[in-house]
């Protein structure tokens, strides 16, 4: 009998692995609806949907390994990182999904709330929050919406050698800012940004990508803490914020 592995689990969703099958259990089926539709629309490799019986979605495992992990050096080649950038560009050039993403007003409001929570609860020093908030505000500008993955972290990008074998976890896909995807892909791995941009093949505003690094980290810390994760581990969100000082 194959061993059942808990990949991730918290009070909103869980992902289990049994051999070459991933079982995703989500309390919010609208996220699963988005994931299934986005994978069907995406012009890049995605996991095969084996079956769906709410609240469970069964997906086939992708070949290869993740591009890396936040807080750990990536052993993937420069060519693999460039391939990830090229895959992002292919996605961003595809037709838009029919559902919108978060508006500028919604993001700005969330930034206000999270910064206040971080300072009021003594989670981070106020000067660290204020500095990164100033940086993050550069991301709050009009953009031309593209098809974004919405959570393009390196653990969601699978490679085999220098080739992309697929991208997982599409529940945050929407219309959004292309530079947000590039920022999430390189969060905590600033040294790989040049490779990603080279593969992306277009001029990008690096200051906006850096702004999204600060924004993502400020917005994520409360959720991570409340769901049992530690954003203060070496190389993770708190270190990303400190690197901006």
Image: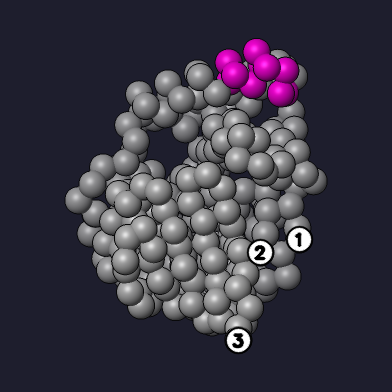
Q: Do the residues labelled 1 and 2 touch (CB within 8 Å)?
A: yes
Residue 155 disc label:
none
Where residue 201 appears, as percent x and y from the top left, is 45, 62
The label nearer to you, 1 versus 3, is: 3
Query: Which residue was labeled with disc 1?
Result: 73
Question: In the image, residue 105 lies at what x, y percent?
Answer: 35, 24
Per the model, the C-alpha gap separating discs 1 and 2 is: 7 Å
When asked about the image quadrant of residue 32, the answer is: bottom left
Which portion, as a residue range, is magenta? 115-124
Q: Name the residue under label 2.
A: 68
Determine the secondary structure under disc 2: loop
Report the front residue among 15 and 46: 15
> What residue sits right under mark 3 in the picture?
1
Does 119 lie within the magenta span?
yes
**Residue farthest bottom in this picture:** 1
Q: Which of 26 and 102 is in front in this view?
A: 26
Q: Residue at x 28, y 68 (%)?
A: 40
């Amino acid at each position: 009998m194959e061993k059942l592995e808990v990949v991730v689990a918290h009070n909103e969703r869980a992902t289990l692995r049994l051999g070459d099958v991933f079982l995703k259990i989500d309390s919010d089926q609208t996220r699963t609806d988005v994931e299934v539709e986005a994978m069907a629309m995406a012009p890049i490799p995605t996991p095969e949907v084996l079956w769906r019986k709410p609240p469970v979605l069964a997906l086939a495992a992708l070949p290869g390994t993740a591009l890396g992990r936040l807080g750990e050096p990536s052993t993937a080649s420069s060519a693999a990182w460039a391939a990830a950038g090229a895959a992002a560009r292919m996605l961003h050039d595809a037709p838009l999904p029919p559902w919108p993403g978060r508006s500028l007003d919604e993001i700005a409001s969330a930034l206000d709330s999270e910064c206040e929570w971080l300072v009021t609860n003594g989670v981070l020093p106020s000067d660290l929050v204020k500095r990164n908030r100033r940086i993050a505000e550069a991301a709050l500008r009009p953009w031309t919406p593209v098809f974004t993955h919405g959570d393009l972290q390196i653990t969601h990008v699978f490679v085999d050698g220098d080739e992309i074998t697929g991208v997982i976890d599409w529940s945050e896909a929407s219309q959004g800012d292309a530079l947000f995807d590039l920022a999430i892909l390189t969060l905590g791995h600033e040294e790989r940004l040049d490779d990603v941009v080279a593969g992306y093949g277009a001029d990008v505003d690096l200051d906006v990508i850096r702004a999204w690094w600060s924004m993502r980290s400020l917005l994520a810390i409360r959720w991570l803490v409340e769901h049992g994760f530690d954003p203060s581990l070496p190389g993770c969100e708190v270190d990303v914020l400190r690197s901006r000082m």
